[in-house]
Amino acid sequence: MRLLILAGILVGLCTAAAAQERRSQSIDLIKRSHPARTAAGLSAADVGDPDSFGRNLHFLGVAQTGLVSFTTGCLPPDPLFPDDRCVEVNPSPAPTSAQFNDIGRINLPAKASNSLLCHSITSFPVWNAANFSGAPGLMRFQHGASFTIENPVLDDPGLIDPTTGVPFGGKLEAVFGSLTLEMHTMQPGDQEFKHHVDTRFCLGGLIGKAVLIDIYGLTGAQADDFFKKPMTIRLNLALRTQLIDDASVLYGLRLFGD
């Protein structure tokens, strides 16, 4: 009976986590776009993203995060790999989590793109999980990406970030949420090894003119000016684990513009 109760609790935890994941919407999802039509007479109702419609695709650069490791014994930092990070995992079954910002970056010149920064994100997570306790336990491996976009247009103290309620201070955060999320119950004595490679390509984009207007409150003129300025994109990585004694992950970002 005790095991059945515990199993029910674990199912509830997984369900709650899934609901939270749905509520934490990625910036890459398509948002309701501003109703204005382009010079060609197209609107979001016609093609979804009229600002980039019919424009050529441009390669804008590539970057990769440092390697983030969760382990029971971190080695001293290697000066040859300054973006690598290591975290000592908590004793099982306690969860371990960490967030690392600016562990990879791309510097774009002015006018690199017209109205959109599109992405291809490829992640490389590896993990070992084990349940050496005497009861079923929740195994969790979750890693996510976010991007800090720095742009001179956002230096204006009169521009307020609606996601924080304070001035942008020269930058905004584009949150993608989980790139990998695996959760399930492990029985006593269970062990597993996973290596997963996944690529996520542009839908709504890393940032676009419509998102700047509809989500971040910029005017059309400010959004146009945003893409005329140089900008820096900094890569951030978050990792949360449970019943995992060793894990590592990194991801790469390739940018495209219009």
Image: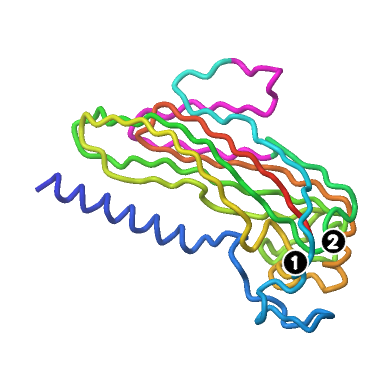
User: Residue 226 bears which disc, if any?
Assistant: 2
Q: Amino acid at mark 2?
A: Phe
Give the main secondary structure of the magenta stretch: loop
Q: Residue at coordinates 57% horizontally, 59% vertically from top-left?
A: 26
Q: Amino acid at mark 1?
A: Leu
Quadrant in the rendering for residue 207: bottom right
Residue 8 pos. (x, y %): 21, 53
Residue 104 pos. (x, y %): 70, 36
Q: Residue at coordinates 46% horizontally, 24% vertically from top-left?
A: 71
| Number of numbered labels in the structure image | 2
Q: Is residue 63 magenta?
A: no
Local crowd size for mark 2, using a 10 Å CA cut-off: few (<14), some (14–19), many (≥20): many
Location of residue 217 with respect to 73 vertically, above or below = below
Q: Are marks 1 and 2 in contact (CB under 8 Å)?
A: yes
Q: Is residue 191 left or right of residue 236?
A: left
Quadrant in the rendering for residue 85: top right
Q: Is residue 225 left or right of residue 30?
A: right
Which residue is the extreme one toward the left?
1
Q: Residue at coordinates 20% horizontally, 48% vertically from top-left?
A: 7
Quadrant in the rendering for residue 241: top left
Q: SS for tag 1?
A: helix
Q: Residue at coordinates 39% horizontally, 34% vertically from top-left?
A: 194
Q: Is 112 in front, or is 85?
A: 112
Q: Which residue is mark 1?
A: 212
Q: Is residue 188 left or right of residue 30?
A: left
Q: SS for tag 2?
A: helix
- The stretch in magenta equals 76-101
Which corner quadrant holds the C terminus? bottom right
Residue 179 pos. (x, y %): 52, 48
Q: Is residue 93 magenta?
A: yes
Local crowd size for mark 1, using a 10 Å CA cut-off: few (<14), some (14–19), many (≥20): some
Residue 177 pos. (x, y %): 54, 53
